Image (tube, rainbow, N blue to C red):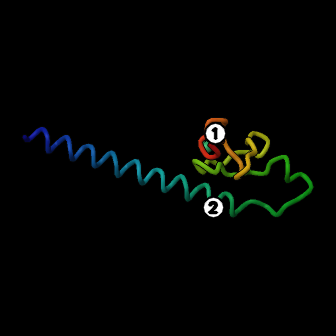
Amino acid sequence: MKYLIVLVVVLVGIWFWRNNRRAALREKAQSRAAAKPVAGPHQHATEVVECAVCSLHLPRIDALPGGRGMYCSEAHRRQAEK
Ligand SMILES: [Zn+2]
């Protein structure tokens, strides 16, 4: 029984740590997007788009266009548009 409690505490700790990390990563991505310079003549080359499924940010040149937005992979495009 004692070990079960220790296991639960460890799992909750890992869960909290992962949640914090995800929030920090998202904040970082948002501040980076906000700090992006205003559109210029070379903008299309480095423009960042967001995957409609997992919200991953990736260069437009690497993204897959779909009927409902841009996707990071063929799997996510199929998942969103099936
Ligand atoms: Zn995705």
Q: Which mark is residue 31?
A: 2
What residue do we see at 66% from left, 42% from top? Answer: 77
| Quadrant containing ligand 1 | top right
x and y percentages locating residue 23 in the rendered image: 48, 56
Nearer the observer, 74 or 63: 74
Q: Dividing the image into 4 quarters, which one contains the N terminus?
A: top left
Report the amino acid beneath label 2. Ser
Dot placed on the residue nearer the N-terminal end, 2 or 1: 2
x and y percentages locating residue 12 in the rendered image: 27, 49
Q: Disc 2 on helix, strand or loop?
A: helix
x and y percentages locating residue 30 in the rendered image: 62, 60
Disc 1 packing (10 Å; few <14; some 14–19; many ≥20): few
Q: Residue lying at the far left in this picture: please name it.
A: 1
x and y percentages locating residue 51 in the rendered image: 65, 48
**In this rendering, would 57 be left or right of 11?**
right
Q: Residue lying at the far right in this picture: please name it.
A: 41
Report the amino acid beneath label 1. Arg
**In this rendering, would 62 be left or right of 26?**
right
Disc 2 packing (10 Å; few <14; some 14–19; many ≥20): few
Q: Residue lying at the far top in this picture: please name it.
A: 74
**Corner quadrant of residue 79:** top right
What residue do we see at 75% from left, 39% from top? Answer: 62
Whether the residue under disc 1 has CB within 8 Å of ligand 1? no
Q: Which mark is residue 61?
A: none
The residue wearing badge 1 is 78
